[in-house]
Amino acid sequence: MRLLQIELYKLWHSRISKVLIFGYFLLIFSIAILSTIKVELGPINFHLAEQGIFNFPYIWHFNTFVIALLKVFFAIIIVAMIGNEYSNKTLKQNLIDGLSKAEFLRTKVYAILAFVVISTLFVFIISLILGGIYSDYNELQIIFMDLEYLLAYAVKLFGFFTFCLFLSILIKRSAFALGFLALWQVTEGIVFGLMKWKLSDLIPQISAEQVFQFFPLNAMGNLIKEPFTRLSAIQNLADQMGEAFTKDYSVSFFNIAIVIVWSALFIRGSYFLLKRRDL
Amino acid sequence: MSNTLLELNELTKKYGGLTAVNKLSLSLTKGKVYGLLGPNGSGKSTTLGMVLNVINPTSGTFQWYDGSLTTHEALKKIGAIIERPNFYPYMTALQNLTLICKIKQCSTDTIEELLKLVNLWDRKKSKFRTFSLGMKQRLAIAAALVNQPDLLILDEPTNGLDPEGIHQIRELILTIAQQGTTILLASHLLDEVEKVCTNVIVLKNGVKYYEGEVEGLSQSFGYFEIATENNEQLLNFLEAHPAIGEISKENKYYKVNLTQDVSTAVFSKELQKKGILLTHFSKKQPSLESQFLSLTQTKEHATPTN
């Protein structure tokens, strides 16, 4: 608790991180604005909220997926905070003042955890409210179906933030760490493409997808699959065109395990870097 | 409880092929004021970095409080300033010190008194990034004292300051030393150390050359500065005298090194008997600077392996 307080004190007194955190939660709220989108063009009468995106239990899937896109806001805060600890040499001063390296890392991890918990609660409450207003089904059983999307959401955020933590400790400069993150995303895609092209020739027993699911960013992405093709409106459209999506949208616990293992590795790796380096 | 605050045992740090600190052993006792002397690059900061948990030793050990506390627990009871003041630029003086109190788990009651002591109370609500270097350095001193430390470590505290800033910091250190705080002052500025320290540790190229009291640094009995009107007569007398060592001429005076303890009264009487009339006569102790130079230079010849 003391360690969390220390980190929150640092965050709270920085104007930039305050603005970003407020901005983040405001944006989550703004998903409610989506519900007010109405298009009336002669015969076409489109009201987004009535397309079923806020129906229970689909809303858990939809909201967790869309709101998870905002995670990049907090990622910037993490990367900037660590970068500043290095460039202002306050990391060094914290250690001299009697924080151990493990404790320093724990302040960061606790702050991430606190943020993930608050963000997940936010998503839960907002979905509950929006669903309460717009959902066609209001039986308790249906409302609390598919809550594993919230778990997937929390794990996804935690995995992503610990990855950012690791990168920023590795690279020490915030701009480069963010650049590296983008580069990593692209690299995963390229490696996947190469594997799809060549891997089956080399090792026929393994498919590229089997390997790809273990890549950190892809594993995080796989936690919550895109919800759009699951919408009945789009399903109907596809049916008419003679195509059917047969996709598994559920949350895979194997996937959750992969991301948790990655998070653990990122935290261990961060500690290893901190421990080994001279400051 | 023992009075040993810190003990180093053959502590060594190598950077690639360079040995920054070489098998350094020493111990610090409560209540003394230590000077850690050595030219730039002699391993002072590396040594401090190791005991302050920011540099990993290559080999050797150190322990705080006889090993009864882990390093980071011990550091909560220590105050240290290394090279430059490091604070959060976006926080005010007050916020920065409050954060340090959270880390050190100490009371925030001392903050007001300390900010007044270092003349920053009027600026307590200014952000750190608006401070001048002198103000930053003074804030660092306040920060190092916020937990009423058992030991205050200062590494080159006057580096980069203007004469007024240097004066202010020195006055502060003297005040703190007089209050009985144990201090370890690392510096290459010898007069800085000479003014406040009771004990010195001399480092060069990572090797310890001397550890002990300031007075014991050289075995010197001091020297006379003499001027007469009849130099020939004086030199004849001096060369015959059993207590006289090396004689050199500096400006208008002869600098006469002593090999035994000779009082001014006795020596001037002897000169008078010989009928030598003095125009200038005084007894002096060599400065820390010249003692330091002679120590590090003679050792260099004595131990060429280093």
Image: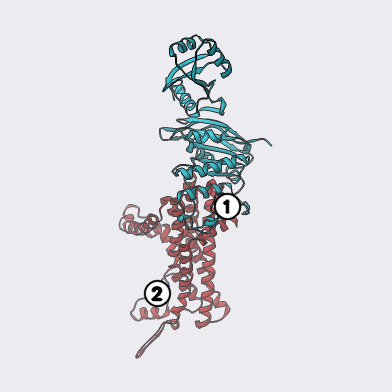
Chain colours: A red, B cyan
Q: Nearer the viewer, residue B236 or B109?
A: B236
On the same chain: label 2 and label 1? no
On the image, the x and y values in percent for residue B303 come to 45, 21
Which residue matches tag 1? B116
Q: Residue A173 got which mark? A: none
Is B62 placed left or right of A198 in the picture?
right
Q: Quadrant of the C terminus of chain B?
A: top left
Chain identity of mark 2 = A
- In the displayed structure, B283 sits above or below A105; it is above
Q: Residues within 10 Å of mark 1 (few under 14, many from 20)?
A: some
Amino acid under label 2? Thr
Q: Residue at x 54, y 13 (%)?
A: B272
Q: Residue at x 49, y 70 (%)?
A: A25
Mark 2 to mark 1: distance in Å? Answer: 67 Å
Q: Nearer the viewer, residue A11 or B139?
A: B139
Quarter holding residue B149: top right
Q: Quadrant of the N terminus of chain B?
A: top right
For residue B22, say whether it is visible: yes
Amino acid under label 1? Lys
User: Which residue lies most toward the right here?
Assistant: B1
Q: Nearer the viewer, mark 2 or mark 1?
A: 1
Q: How many circles with numbers are drawn on the protein?
A: 2
Q: Residue A229 got which mark? A: 2
Chain identity of mark 1 = B
For residue B61, say whether it is visible: no
